[in-house]
Image (cartoon, rainbow, N blue to C red):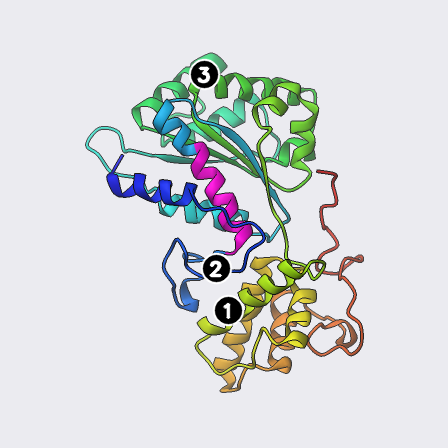
Amino acid sequence: MSTQRYAFLEKLQATRYKNCGLQPSAIGESESVSTWAESPIEHSSFLNAAARIADAHLKFINRKCGACMHVIGQSGAGKSILIAWYLARNPVEHRSDFDLIPVLVVQTPSKPSVKNLAEAMLRALGAPGVHIGTENQKTNRILELLVSHGVELIFIDEFQHFVDHRSAATLEVTDWLKALVDATNRAVVLVGLPRSAIIVRQNEQLRRRFSRRCVLHPFSADTEDSWLEFRAVLRELHRRTPVPADDFHEPDMARRFLNASEGLISYLVTIASGAIDIASRTSQKIDKLVLAAAFEEEVWPGVPDDLNPFIADGELRPLRRGGEPFELWDNSRR
Protein backbone atom coordinates (compact mmCIF):
# COMPACT_ATOMS: atom_id res chain seq x y z
CA MET A 1 0.00 0.00 0.00
CA SER A 2 1.26 3.47 -0.88
CA THR A 3 2.11 5.88 1.92
CA GLN A 4 -0.27 8.42 0.40
CA ARG A 5 -3.24 6.04 0.37
CA TYR A 6 -2.55 4.87 3.92
CA ALA A 7 -2.35 8.49 5.12
CA PHE A 8 -5.68 9.23 3.43
CA LEU A 9 -7.36 6.29 5.16
CA GLU A 10 -5.98 7.33 8.55
CA LYS A 11 -7.19 10.88 8.03
CA LEU A 12 -10.61 9.66 6.96
CA GLN A 13 -10.82 7.17 9.84
CA ALA A 14 -10.28 9.99 12.30
CA THR A 15 -13.11 12.01 10.81
CA ARG A 16 -16.27 11.87 12.87
CA TYR A 17 -18.92 14.21 11.48
CA LYS A 18 -21.92 13.76 13.72
CA ASN A 19 -24.45 16.53 14.33
CA CYS A 20 -22.08 19.20 13.08
CA GLY A 21 -22.20 21.79 10.35
CA LEU A 22 -21.11 21.06 6.83
CA GLN A 23 -17.48 21.66 6.05
CA PRO A 24 -17.27 21.38 2.24
CA SER A 25 -14.33 19.50 0.80
CA ALA A 26 -12.91 18.61 4.20
CA ILE A 27 -11.41 15.43 2.75
CA GLY A 28 -11.58 15.85 -1.03
CA GLU A 29 -11.11 18.82 -3.26
CA SER A 30 -13.74 21.40 -4.14
CA GLU A 31 -14.88 20.97 -7.73
CA SER A 32 -17.15 22.66 -10.22
CA VAL A 33 -20.72 21.60 -10.91
CA SER A 34 -19.56 19.48 -13.87
CA THR A 35 -17.86 17.04 -11.50
CA TRP A 36 -20.45 16.71 -8.74
CA ALA A 37 -20.50 12.93 -9.15
CA GLU A 38 -16.71 12.69 -8.76
CA SER A 39 -16.51 15.25 -5.93
CA PRO A 40 -19.79 15.09 -4.02
CA ILE A 41 -20.63 17.49 -1.23
CA GLU A 42 -19.09 15.89 1.84
CA HIS A 43 -21.88 16.35 4.36
CA SER A 44 -21.83 14.82 7.83
CA SER A 45 -23.75 11.61 7.10
CA PHE A 46 -21.62 10.94 4.01
CA LEU A 47 -18.31 11.51 5.82
CA ASN A 48 -19.40 9.54 8.87
CA ALA A 49 -20.14 6.54 6.64
CA ALA A 50 -16.83 6.97 4.78
CA ALA A 51 -14.93 7.25 8.06
CA ARG A 52 -16.45 4.05 9.41
CA ILE A 53 -15.66 2.23 6.16
CA ALA A 54 -12.06 3.43 6.42
CA ASP A 55 -11.94 2.13 10.00
CA ALA A 56 -13.08 -1.33 8.85
CA HIS A 57 -10.56 -1.13 5.97
CA LEU A 58 -7.63 -0.24 8.23
CA LYS A 59 -8.41 -3.13 10.54
CA PHE A 60 -7.57 -5.47 7.68
CA ILE A 61 -4.47 -3.52 6.65
CA ASN A 62 -3.09 -3.32 10.17
CA ARG A 63 -4.30 -6.62 11.65
CA LYS A 64 -5.19 -8.77 8.62
CA CYS A 65 -8.68 -9.10 10.07
CA GLY A 66 -11.06 -6.58 8.55
CA ALA A 67 -14.32 -5.50 10.15
CA CYS A 68 -17.71 -5.98 8.52
CA MET A 69 -20.45 -3.38 8.35
CA HIS A 70 -23.76 -2.58 6.71
CA VAL A 71 -24.52 0.76 5.02
CA ILE A 72 -28.18 1.50 4.35
CA GLY A 73 -30.05 4.41 2.82
CA GLN A 74 -33.00 5.33 0.65
CA SER A 75 -32.64 5.35 -3.13
CA GLY A 76 -30.98 8.69 -3.85
CA ALA A 77 -29.32 9.00 -0.44
CA GLY A 78 -25.88 8.75 -2.04
CA LYS A 79 -24.90 5.11 -1.54
CA SER A 80 -23.57 4.64 -5.09
CA ILE A 81 -21.78 7.99 -4.97
CA LEU A 82 -20.19 6.96 -1.66
CA ILE A 83 -18.88 3.74 -3.20
CA ALA A 84 -17.58 5.56 -6.29
CA TRP A 85 -15.95 8.26 -4.11
CA TYR A 86 -14.22 5.64 -1.95
CA LEU A 87 -13.18 3.58 -4.96
CA ALA A 88 -11.63 6.62 -6.67
CA ARG A 89 -9.45 7.18 -3.61
CA ASN A 90 -8.34 3.55 -3.58
CA PRO A 91 -7.72 3.01 -7.31
CA VAL A 92 -6.63 -0.09 -9.18
CA GLU A 93 -2.87 -0.25 -9.73
CA HIS A 94 -1.90 -1.98 -12.97
CA ARG A 95 0.83 -4.59 -12.65
CA SER A 96 2.48 -7.05 -15.04
CA ASP A 97 0.89 -10.13 -13.48
CA PHE A 98 -2.20 -9.34 -11.40
CA ASP A 99 -3.57 -5.83 -11.10
CA LEU A 100 -3.75 -4.58 -7.51
CA ILE A 101 -7.44 -4.11 -6.63
CA PRO A 102 -7.51 -2.71 -3.08
CA VAL A 103 -11.29 -2.16 -3.14
CA LEU A 104 -13.57 -4.62 -4.93
CA VAL A 105 -17.18 -3.73 -5.80
CA VAL A 106 -19.60 -6.62 -6.35
CA GLN A 107 -23.18 -6.08 -7.57
CA THR A 108 -25.68 -8.45 -5.97
CA PRO A 109 -27.59 -10.31 -8.72
CA SER A 110 -31.30 -9.50 -8.94
CA LYS A 111 -32.16 -13.06 -7.85
CA PRO A 112 -29.21 -14.10 -5.68
CA SER A 113 -27.97 -17.68 -5.60
CA VAL A 114 -24.62 -19.15 -4.64
CA LYS A 115 -23.88 -19.71 -8.33
CA ASN A 116 -24.63 -16.22 -9.62
CA LEU A 117 -23.18 -14.38 -6.60
CA ALA A 118 -19.93 -16.33 -6.93
CA GLU A 119 -19.90 -15.53 -10.65
CA ALA A 120 -20.51 -11.84 -9.89
CA MET A 121 -17.47 -11.84 -7.61
CA LEU A 122 -15.31 -13.57 -10.21
CA ARG A 123 -16.49 -11.09 -12.83
CA ALA A 124 -15.59 -8.16 -10.55
CA LEU A 125 -12.13 -9.71 -10.14
CA GLY A 126 -11.74 -9.83 -13.92
CA ALA A 127 -11.59 -13.61 -14.04
CA PRO A 128 -12.21 -15.37 -17.36
CA GLY A 129 -14.71 -18.22 -17.65
CA VAL A 130 -16.81 -17.23 -14.63
CA HIS A 131 -19.40 -19.91 -15.46
CA ILE A 132 -16.85 -22.74 -15.43
CA GLY A 133 -16.49 -25.06 -12.44
CA THR A 134 -18.41 -26.32 -9.46
CA GLU A 135 -19.48 -24.20 -6.49
CA ASN A 136 -16.40 -25.26 -4.53
CA GLN A 137 -14.10 -24.59 -7.47
CA LYS A 138 -15.54 -21.11 -7.92
CA THR A 139 -15.20 -20.39 -4.21
CA ASN A 140 -11.57 -21.48 -4.25
CA ARG A 141 -10.89 -19.31 -7.30
CA ILE A 142 -12.38 -16.32 -5.48
CA LEU A 143 -10.20 -16.91 -2.43
CA GLU A 144 -7.08 -17.25 -4.57
CA LEU A 145 -7.84 -14.17 -6.66
CA LEU A 146 -8.57 -12.03 -3.61
CA VAL A 147 -5.00 -12.74 -2.51
CA SER A 148 -3.45 -12.38 -5.98
CA HIS A 149 -5.15 -9.02 -6.55
CA GLY A 150 -4.38 -7.72 -3.05
CA VAL A 151 -8.03 -7.05 -2.24
CA GLU A 152 -8.41 -5.32 1.13
CA LEU A 153 -12.09 -4.36 1.22
CA ILE A 154 -15.18 -5.71 -0.57
CA PHE A 155 -18.38 -3.75 -1.21
CA ILE A 156 -21.46 -5.90 -1.89
CA ASP A 157 -23.97 -3.46 -3.37
CA GLU A 158 -27.75 -3.74 -3.87
CA PHE A 159 -28.02 -6.14 -0.94
CA GLN A 160 -31.80 -5.62 -0.76
CA HIS A 161 -32.10 -8.12 -3.62
CA PHE A 162 -31.78 -10.82 -0.96
CA VAL A 163 -35.08 -9.53 0.49
CA ASP A 164 -36.82 -8.76 -2.80
CA HIS A 165 -36.37 -12.27 -4.17
CA ARG A 166 -36.28 -14.50 -1.14
CA SER A 167 -36.50 -18.17 -1.95
CA ALA A 168 -35.44 -21.56 -0.66
CA ALA A 169 -31.93 -20.66 -1.88
CA THR A 170 -31.67 -17.52 0.28
CA LEU A 171 -30.46 -19.31 3.40
CA GLU A 172 -27.97 -21.30 1.34
CA VAL A 173 -26.47 -18.21 -0.29
CA THR A 174 -26.30 -16.21 2.95
CA ASP A 175 -24.57 -19.15 4.62
CA TRP A 176 -22.12 -19.27 1.70
CA LEU A 177 -21.49 -15.54 2.03
CA LYS A 178 -20.90 -15.89 5.78
CA ALA A 179 -18.39 -18.70 5.17
CA LEU A 180 -16.63 -16.64 2.50
CA VAL A 181 -16.37 -13.63 4.84
CA ASP A 182 -14.84 -15.86 7.50
CA ALA A 183 -12.39 -17.41 5.07
CA THR A 184 -11.14 -14.14 3.57
CA ASN A 185 -10.83 -12.02 6.73
CA ARG A 186 -11.25 -9.01 4.41
CA ALA A 187 -13.29 -5.96 5.36
CA VAL A 188 -16.74 -6.47 3.84
CA VAL A 189 -19.37 -3.74 3.49
CA LEU A 190 -22.95 -4.60 2.59
CA VAL A 191 -24.80 -1.72 0.93
CA GLY A 192 -28.53 -1.52 0.29
CA LEU A 193 -31.94 -0.01 0.90
CA PRO A 194 -33.33 -0.01 4.46
CA ARG A 195 -35.17 -3.29 3.85
CA SER A 196 -31.82 -5.03 3.31
CA ALA A 197 -31.52 -4.96 7.12
CA ILE A 198 -34.28 -7.58 7.24
CA ILE A 199 -32.07 -10.33 5.80
CA VAL A 200 -29.22 -9.43 8.16
CA ARG A 201 -31.51 -9.27 11.17
CA GLN A 202 -33.13 -12.64 10.42
CA ASN A 203 -29.85 -14.51 9.90
CA GLU A 204 -28.06 -14.96 13.20
CA GLN A 205 -24.65 -15.48 11.59
CA LEU A 206 -24.92 -12.37 9.42
CA ARG A 207 -26.39 -10.33 12.27
CA ARG A 208 -23.36 -11.04 14.43
CA ARG A 209 -20.85 -10.31 11.69
CA PHE A 210 -22.58 -7.21 10.32
CA SER A 211 -23.73 -5.67 13.60
CA ARG A 212 -21.92 -2.43 12.67
CA ARG A 213 -24.52 -0.41 10.81
CA CYS A 214 -24.38 3.04 9.28
CA VAL A 215 -27.38 4.93 7.87
CA LEU A 216 -27.17 7.58 5.17
CA HIS A 217 -30.01 9.68 6.55
CA PRO A 218 -31.96 12.02 4.30
CA PHE A 219 -31.99 15.64 5.41
CA SER A 220 -35.07 16.89 7.23
CA ALA A 221 -36.45 19.90 9.03
CA ASP A 222 -37.22 17.80 12.11
CA THR A 223 -34.06 18.86 13.92
CA GLU A 224 -32.21 22.15 13.83
CA ASP A 225 -28.90 20.42 13.08
CA SER A 226 -30.27 18.61 10.01
CA TRP A 227 -32.09 21.71 8.75
CA LEU A 228 -29.03 23.91 9.12
CA GLU A 229 -26.79 21.39 7.38
CA PHE A 230 -29.33 20.98 4.58
CA ARG A 231 -29.21 24.72 4.00
CA ALA A 232 -25.40 24.57 4.08
CA VAL A 233 -25.50 21.90 1.36
CA LEU A 234 -27.76 24.15 -0.71
CA ARG A 235 -25.32 27.01 -0.19
CA GLU A 236 -22.54 24.79 -1.54
CA LEU A 237 -24.70 23.75 -4.52
CA HIS A 238 -25.32 27.42 -5.22
CA ARG A 239 -21.60 28.16 -4.96
CA ARG A 240 -20.84 25.54 -7.61
CA THR A 241 -23.58 26.74 -9.96
CA PRO A 242 -21.99 28.38 -13.02
CA VAL A 243 -24.97 30.58 -13.96
CA PRO A 244 -26.79 33.36 -12.05
CA ALA A 245 -29.25 31.91 -9.54
CA ASP A 246 -31.44 32.95 -6.64
CA ASP A 247 -30.09 31.86 -3.28
CA PHE A 248 -30.86 28.16 -2.83
CA HIS A 249 -30.39 28.27 0.95
CA GLU A 250 -32.86 31.09 1.65
CA PRO A 251 -35.46 29.59 4.08
CA ASP A 252 -38.47 29.50 1.73
CA MET A 253 -36.39 28.22 -1.19
CA ALA A 254 -34.74 25.63 1.08
CA ARG A 255 -38.17 24.41 2.18
CA ARG A 256 -39.12 23.92 -1.46
CA PHE A 257 -35.88 22.07 -2.24
CA LEU A 258 -36.49 19.82 0.78
CA ASN A 259 -39.97 18.88 -0.42
CA ALA A 260 -38.79 18.36 -4.01
CA SER A 261 -35.97 16.05 -2.95
CA GLU A 262 -37.28 14.41 0.24
CA GLY A 263 -33.91 15.48 1.62
CA LEU A 264 -32.04 13.10 -0.69
CA ILE A 265 -28.76 14.46 -2.02
CA SER A 266 -29.01 12.81 -5.45
CA TYR A 267 -32.33 14.55 -6.14
CA LEU A 268 -30.88 17.91 -5.10
CA VAL A 269 -28.07 17.49 -7.62
CA THR A 270 -30.48 16.28 -10.32
CA ILE A 271 -32.77 19.28 -9.89
CA ALA A 272 -29.88 21.76 -9.73
CA SER A 273 -28.25 20.24 -12.83
CA GLY A 274 -31.54 20.34 -14.71
CA ALA A 275 -32.03 23.99 -13.75
CA ILE A 276 -28.52 24.83 -14.97
CA ASP A 277 -29.25 23.18 -18.32
CA ILE A 278 -32.52 25.12 -18.72
CA ALA A 279 -30.96 28.42 -17.67
CA SER A 280 -28.03 27.89 -20.04
CA ARG A 281 -30.33 27.12 -22.99
CA THR A 282 -32.62 30.07 -22.35
CA SER A 283 -30.15 32.62 -20.92
CA GLN A 284 -32.28 32.93 -17.80
CA LYS A 285 -31.39 33.29 -14.16
CA ILE A 286 -32.27 30.25 -12.04
CA ASP A 287 -35.39 31.21 -10.10
CA LYS A 288 -38.43 29.31 -8.84
CA LEU A 289 -39.94 29.05 -12.33
CA VAL A 290 -36.75 27.54 -13.76
CA LEU A 291 -36.48 25.16 -10.80
CA ALA A 292 -40.13 24.19 -11.26
CA ALA A 293 -39.41 23.38 -14.90
CA ALA A 294 -36.34 21.35 -13.89
CA PHE A 295 -38.39 19.41 -11.32
CA GLU A 296 -40.98 18.56 -13.98
CA GLU A 297 -38.33 17.64 -16.54
CA GLU A 298 -36.03 15.63 -14.29
CA VAL A 299 -38.14 14.27 -11.40
CA TRP A 300 -41.88 14.26 -12.10
CA PRO A 301 -43.02 14.66 -15.73
CA GLY A 302 -46.52 16.11 -15.84
CA VAL A 303 -46.54 17.25 -12.21
CA PRO A 304 -49.63 19.37 -11.43
CA ASP A 305 -48.74 22.98 -10.67
CA ASP A 306 -50.33 22.75 -7.22
CA LEU A 307 -47.94 19.90 -6.32
CA ASN A 308 -44.78 21.30 -7.91
CA PRO A 309 -42.79 22.31 -4.83
CA PHE A 310 -41.20 25.33 -6.49
CA ILE A 311 -44.44 27.07 -7.48
CA ALA A 312 -47.10 25.54 -5.18
CA ASP A 313 -48.65 27.82 -2.58
CA GLY A 314 -49.26 26.98 1.06
CA GLU A 315 -48.05 23.98 3.00
CA LEU A 316 -46.11 21.38 1.02
CA ARG A 317 -46.89 17.73 1.71
CA PRO A 318 -44.60 14.72 1.13
CA LEU A 319 -44.86 13.40 -2.43
CA ARG A 320 -45.28 9.72 -1.53
CA ARG A 321 -48.72 8.88 -2.90
CA GLY A 322 -49.30 6.58 -5.87
CA GLY A 323 -47.73 7.93 -9.04
CA GLU A 324 -45.66 10.51 -7.13
CA PRO A 325 -41.84 10.59 -7.08
CA PHE A 326 -41.34 9.04 -3.66
CA GLU A 327 -44.14 6.46 -3.58
CA LEU A 328 -41.54 3.68 -3.30
CA TRP A 329 -40.06 5.16 -0.13
CA ASP A 330 -38.66 2.25 1.87
CA ASN A 331 -40.30 2.36 5.31
CA SER A 332 -38.87 -0.99 6.40
CA ARG A 333 -38.10 -1.16 10.09
CA ARG A 334 -34.35 -0.86 10.53
Q: Which residue lies at the image location 74% right of the left edge and 40% below the top edge?
A: 332
Q: Is residue 53 magenta?
A: yes
Looking at the image, is mark 1 or mark 3 earlier in the sequence?
3
Residue 162 vertical placement versus 317 (above, below)? above
- Whether pointer 2 and pointer 3 mark residues with C-beta atoms closer than 8 Å, the reply is no
- Whether pointer 1 and pointer 3 mark residues with C-beta atoms closer than 8 Å, the reply is no
Circle 3 sits in a helix, a strand or a loop, which is it? helix
Q: CA distance from mark 2 to mark 1?
A: 8 Å
Q: Which residue lies at the image location 31% right of the left edge and 28% below the top edge?
A: 149
Question: What residue would you read off at disc 3?
Answer: 183
Question: What residue would you read off at disc 1?
Answer: 237
Instruction: Kindly identify the amino acid type of the residue bearing the numbered disc 3.
Output: Ala
x, y percent for residue 161: 63, 35
* Magenta span: 43-56
Q: Sort mark 3 into few (<14), some (14-19) or many (20+) by Cα contacts within 10 Å.
A: few
Q: Nearer the viewer, residue 91 or 236?
A: 236
Circle 1 sits in a helix, a strand or a loop, which is it? helix
Instruction: Kindly identify the amino acid type of the residue bearing the numbered disc 2.
Output: Ile
Question: What residue would you read off at disc 2?
Answer: 41
Q: Sort mark 1 into few (<14), some (14-19) or many (20+) by Cα contacts within 10 Å.
A: many
